[in-house]
Amino acid sequence: MNSRDRTILAVNHQEPDRVPYDLGGTTVTAITRPAYLGAMKFRKLTPGIKSAEIDPIQQIIIPSETNLQKLNVDTRRIGAHRIPGFEWEKVMGYEKISVTDLYGCNWEYHREKGLYFNQSTFPLEKYGTLSGAMPHLNRIDWNAYGQILRQDLQSQIEGLEPYYIVADRNTAGLTENSLRVRGYEKWYMDTVLDTGGVEDLLERMMEDKIQYWDLVIDWAIENGTSDQIMVISEADDLGTQDTTIIDPGQLRAMVIPRWEKIFRHVKGRLPHVKIFMHSCGAIRELLPDLIDAGMDILNPVQFTAAGMELKALKRDFGDVITFWGGGVDTQNTLNKGTPEQVKDEVKKILDIMAPGGGFVFSPVHNIQHDVSPENFWAMWDTLQDYGKY
C-alpha cells in the first residue's frame, strides 16, 4: 500500500495497513532545524534538507526527499513560502536579521539569543481606530506574488504521485493576521469598541485567502495536477489553553462564517479535497460550528487544553472528522519527558485514536528545538512498531 492510498483510507475513516505519518506536510506539522539535525546525526543519517526557508519565522525546515522516505512519511507539502524570496529579502545586520512579510509586519531574529523570528512592528497599531486604519493596510501585489508562487509549486509537485499531497496556506489565519497587523492589545479592544473595523479587516483577510487559493487551484488545473491535491490546509488559532480567544458568540458571528466562505469556495473548485484546519487551544465548543463550515480534518488536537480530552473527542466527532495530530504532547512529554515516557504516551494515544481510522499521526504542533534525538526516535520507533493495524 503506498502513502497516498494509506492516507486516503485513513481520512475516510477506514483502517489502512498502518497509521499514516506526517512530518512537514504543513508548516504546523513540521520540525525545527536544530531538532532535525540532531535527530539525523543521532542515527548517522545524512541531514539533507529539501527546503530551509519554507517558514523562517518558525525556523522549521522540510527534510530531504531521501529522509522523508527513510522516515516513512506519507505526506508531501506544496504551497507558498511564508516570506516570498526570503533569501534576497532579508536584511542582514550585525546583531540581528530582519524581514518584512506580506502585510508589512517586520520580524527580527537575534543572532546570539534568538530561536525564532519575533514580530517587531504592527503596521496599523499607531492609528486611533481600526476603521480609520484600514485604508493604510498594505495591499498584496497578486500578479508579482503569483509568478513566484507558480514557480514554487511547479518545483514542489514533481515526483510526488505516490504521496498524499497537502496544499498548504501562505500566511496565518484571519484572526492571527488581524492581530499582527493591528497589534494584540489594540485588536482585542477593537472587538469591543470597533466591531465594524474588525469585520472590515477580517473581510480583507478572507478575500486575500480566496485570492491565494485561486492562484493555487488555477495553477493545478492548468498543469493537470488538481487531482493530486488531496488536502487544503489552513490555520487560525481560535483557542487559548483554557478558553477561546474571544467570546465564542463573536467567533461564530464574525470569524467562522468567513472561514465557511473560504472552505465552500475551495470545495466548489476542487470538490474532492478535504479541508484541514489547524487551531490550537480549547476549541471543543467550536467544533460543531467548524464542521458545519466545512472542516474535515482537525489539527493539532491539543489534548492538554481544557475540554480537549482525546477519548471524548474520538467518541463525539470521530465519525465526522479526521484527527491529524495529537500523537504526543509537545508542551511536556516530547520535549521534557524520558524516552520511556514518550513511548508510553504514543502507545496510549494510538490505542485511543487509531481504531476505525480517522487518524493521521503527528505530534501536537511542530517538533521544537528542545526535543532530544532520543525522544524523537522514541516517538518514531513506537509509531513504526505499534501503529500497525
Image (cartoon, grey):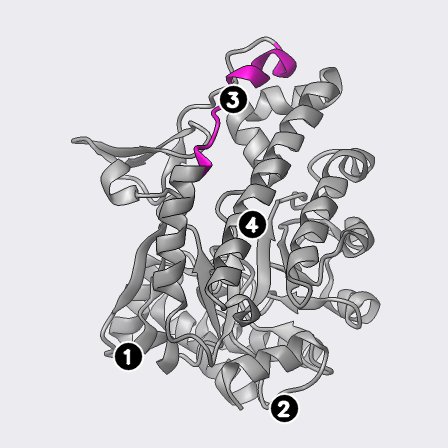
Q: Which of 172 and 338 is in front in this view?
A: 172
The residue type indicated by label 4 comes to Trp
Range covered by the magenta-colored residues: 129-142
Image location (x, y in percent) of residue 379: 47, 75
The residue type indicated by label 3 comes to Leu
Rendered image: mark on residue 129 = none
Tell me the residue that label 4 is attached to.
213
Tell me the residue that label 1 is attached to.
43
Of tags 1 and 4, the one toward the viewer is 4
Q: Residues within 10 Å of mark 3 (few under 14, many from 20)?
A: some
Q: Residues within 10 Å of mark 1 (few under 14, many from 20)?
A: few
Image location (x, y in percent) of residue 111: 23, 39
Tell me the residue that label 2 is attached to.
389
**Mark positioned earlier in the residue sequence (1 or 3):** 1
Query: Given the current orientation, which residue lies at the most extreme top position?
Result: 128
State whether residue 60 appears in this view.
no
Image location (x, y in percent) of residue 214: 56, 49
User: Residue at the location (47% across, 55% down)?
Assistant: 27
User: Residue at the location (32% across, 34% down)?
Assistant: 99
Disc 3 secondary structure class: loop
Of tags 4 and 2, the one toward the viewer is 4
Disc 4 secondary structure class: helix
Disc 1 secondary structure class: loop
109 relative position to 331: left or right: left
Rendered image: mark on residue 137 = 3
Answer whether labels 2 and 1 touch (C-beta < 8 Å).
Answer: no
